Image (tube, coloured by chain):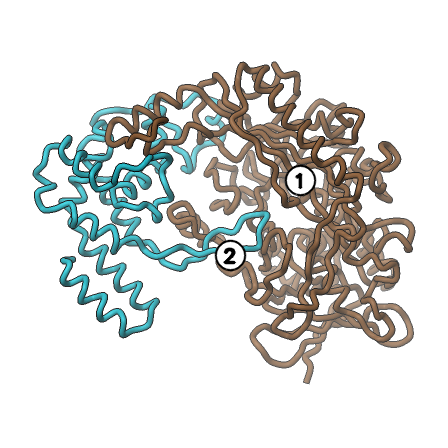
Amino acid sequence: MRRVIESDVCIIGSGISAAMVAEKLADLGAASIVVVEAGDESNRAAERYALRRRYLMYGETPWRNDHLDGYEVDGIQSRSMQVGGLAMHWGGVTPRFSPEDFRVRSLYGVGHDWPISYEELDPWYQEAEVRLGVAGEQGPPELDPRGAPFPQAAIPLSYNLELLRGWTDKAGIPMWSQPSAKNSVPYRGRPACCRNDTCFPVCPIGAKYSPDHSWDPLRSSGRVTLIPRTVVRRLEVEGPGDRVSRAVAVARDGGAETEFRARVFVVAAGYVWSSHLLLLSKSSRFPDGLANRSGLVGKFVGGHRNVGGFVSLPLRLYPGINEQHSLVSKKFMRTPRGPRYLRHDLRVWESAAGREPRLGDAAGKLLLGDELLADWRRRATTGAARVRAYYDVIPDRESAVTLDPAKRTPWNDPLPRLSLRDDPVSAELRAPSEAAIRQLFETMAKAGDGTVLSTRSDSFQDHPAGGCRMGSDPAQSVTDSWGRTHDHENLFVVGAPTCVSMGCANGTLTFSALSLRSAQEIGKDLSSRG
Amino acid sequence: MTTTRRRFVLGVAALVPLPFVARRLHGAAVASLDRARLRALAEAVLPAELGSTGIESTVVAFGLWLDGYREGAELLHGYGTGEIRVTGPSPALRWAAQLDALGESFVSLPRAERQARLRTALGTGRFAGLPPIDRAPHIAVGLLAFFYDSPYATDLCYEVMIGRNGCRPLATSAQKPLPLARGG
């Protein structure tokens, strides 16, 4: 016999987007919120020092149960399925997209415009910055427009980054402290950052925001019920209307199915599993799955690619002062760099590249004892910088999450398959874009009397999103700008899947802002319908 | 562990489940490491300016690292891949044998002669970067990889107190690191 759990709101997934929705709805006074998470509980805060120690000593993961065996998905970019999701081990970097990201079709004739503007999203960016506790420096207003100051002063530039900023100034590139969800001062019961340098993969003191900082108080105060180790297999519509009436789930520990009934369902399962659930929810009435009359569920998935490199500079740097903090510039996000469409961010970190201790000298001769240290010291008298640019990639319609006919979950449901594909315009631009970024690194190096040590382009696309993109036209999108699906008035998709494009900067703050905006609309629904 | 005893342990190992065997072999190998010879090895390969205390503390820390090594432990999986990887076989047994192979006289040799013996043991190939600690082909390289991976080695190289990976006030990050305290 099925177990039935009823609530006002049922949220599927417990990552950062889910945490933002739950926190906001709880603040708005939602009576009952149930969160269903397929993964395990994440490790407790008190365990993180010891787990970090093993990470530093042996490279072991501090997040041992953060994925499900039997869920090996072709093409997936990262695996994280646990309470808190991927943001349990994110780096905490929180840039905003730039205004142009929302209007690339209108401005540059590529990709697709969003149904909302940067200006409309600005208040939600502000709220996300407050809830996550973002420490940031206001960049030049023409490059970094924002409606309110950051809630915390910036993470200070380290001695190394100050020297590197002198270099980028010479190169004519304004750079400033990377906004981050890491406390520069004690904030909301969490301590200030103390430069442990392991923001990714684990902050041992809680100075970096992770979703447990939302879930723990919400759960302990009884405002949210979070049920882990429970896989939602499908959403169902009962009766003649289009409202979703239940989510059918199975506990990983076995036993009968659970039926979650709610007034509003919120799919907050990230860029793969959100589309996957909607596609799995097919029936005779909805043969292509729920919310999919447009045929676009799972489509237009993508991220941004990057070109990175290392630059040798005649600067005396001291690697390790605050390795994960960086300089950032939006100079190349605001306007395309040339006649071809190319927009990208730019970040600069301290680095020890080319200056690592080594066992053999340049001739391959073995170094032992004092020779090894002397060789290291000689090479460490000058410094290096790590540079990286994320550039905008326009996803093709068929860049998609689909159901894999060859692989199944332990419950015999098809697993998703992810196949990323550039829009033809982006495919054509890939080589010249990457060449232009490499040339920029060369120009920067020259400005500092340095040399480029190496560059590389990653083939994967970072900060992936899409799959349930928002839009005003139900034939061309899955949700409206609030994340409400066009086809089901009480079914929302929030965060990353709703993105129309993935910009050229880390996406988590944007996903959070979009989720808060969705939560506001969900809250209105709940209050207007009593 | 002597060669005969090691053969006996390996023989017994064939009769019991593999993970259990691996743990036992690892533990036995760590326990059997000739500490005096390891110390003599450290004196030969680590920088002399570490001093007796620094070398001793490195040897102790290396022993603790080896003792704490877990075979088959899940490694961090980063962005950009869905692959799950695990730690490889414990290097303890192999390293213990290599330490044995240096011979009893190794401890009483002058530093230069110990280094010469190690050069012979390490072969004549072309040497480059330091490998990950657990994949070091020889215990001498493992010890070097361990030491040079440490925050203290970075401080020693730059001769300032950076304190990488330590908990340090955010406000002092803008300052040039202070010179490294010496002596004592």
Q: How many marks?
A: 2
Q: Position of residue A341 (x, y in %)?
A: 78, 31
Q: Determine which residue is flagged by label 1.
A: A305
Give the color of chain B as drawn. Answer: cyan
- Callout 2 amino acid: Ile
Front position in the image: B22 or B27: B22
The C terminus of chain A lies in quadrant: bottom right
The image quadrant that residue A85 belongs to is bottom right
Give the color of chain A as drawn. Answer: brown
Q: CA distance from mark 1 to mark 2?
A: 22 Å
Q: Determine which residue is flagged by label 2.
A: B84
- Callout 1 amino acid: Arg
User: Dot 1 surroundings within 10 Å: few (below 14), some, or many (20 or more)?
Assistant: many
Q: Are marks 1 and 2 in contact (CB under 8 Å)?
A: no
Residue at point 66%, 27% (across, down): A329
Whether residue A165 sits left or right of residue A399 in the image: it is left
- SS label for mark 1: strand
Residue B38, disc: none
The N terminus of chain A lies in quadrant: bottom right
Front position in the image: A40 or B132: B132
Q: Chain of mark 2?
A: B
